[in-house]
């Protein structure tokens, strides 16, 4: 059960961030086997003064089109699966929305299954 947060600078195309979310969800389904209907996202646009990034950290040249993607998910995926997810998201954003791969910043936050409640005040995944 991932929850995805996507942050971008405001764009003229109001639907752009939603398209990014769709690509991220499809990439999670193919790269790390996220099931159908397991799609929970917070999509946010920010003005330039509320969107801070280093344009050259680690020698990667970023532009104002940088996209921050934070995915909170159950722990347990292999390093290979994570690398495939990063690559799949970056490639699909590039191919479908012309986003430079250098402008795709992804962070995974892994949690134990008992750290989720999907509603009703219950820990549905706790054993």
Image (spheres, rainbow, N blue to C red):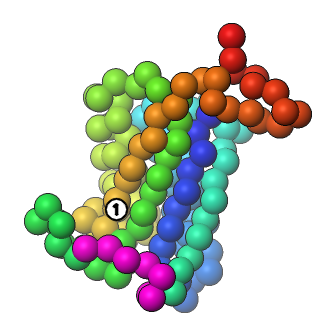
- Residue 63: horizontal and vertical position, in percent? 28, 79
Where, quadrant-wise, is the C terminus in this rendering? top right
Image: magenta residue range: 48-54
Task: Tell which of 78 and 92 is nearer to you.
Answer: 78
Side (left or right) of 96 relative to 90: right
**Residue, x 46% and y 34% (percent of image)?**
110
**Residue, x 44% and y 87% (percent of image)?**
48
Q: Quadrant of residue 62?
A: bottom left
- Residue 17: horizontal and vertical position, in percent? 56, 69
Task: Tell which of 83 and 56 is nearer to you.
Answer: 56
Q: Quadrant of residue 103?
A: bottom left
Figure check: 71 above or below 53:
above
Give the secondary structure at mark 1. Answer: strand
Side (left or right) of 51 relative to 37: left
- Residue 16: horizontal and vertical position, in percent? 55, 73
- Residue 104: horizontal and vertical position, in percent? 34, 62
Side (left or right) of 80 relative to 22: left
**Residue, x 35% and y 30% (percent of image)?**
81
């Amino acid at each position: 059960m991932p929850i995805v947060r996507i942050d971008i600078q405001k764009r003229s195309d109001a639907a752009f961030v939603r398209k990014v979310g769709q690509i991220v969800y499809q990439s999670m389904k193919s790269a790390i086997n996220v099931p159908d209907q397991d799609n929970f996202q917070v999509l946010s646009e920010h003005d330039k003064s509320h969107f801070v990034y280093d344009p050259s950290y680690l020698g990667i040249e970023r532009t104002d089109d940088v996209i921050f993607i934070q995915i909170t998910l159950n722990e347990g995926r292999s390093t290979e699966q994570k690398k495939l997810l990063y690559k799949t998201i970056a490639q699909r954003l590039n191919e479908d929305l012309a986003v430079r791969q250098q402008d795709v910043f992804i962070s995974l936050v892994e949690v134990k299954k008992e750290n989720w409640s999907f509603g009703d005040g219950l820990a549905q995944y706790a054993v």
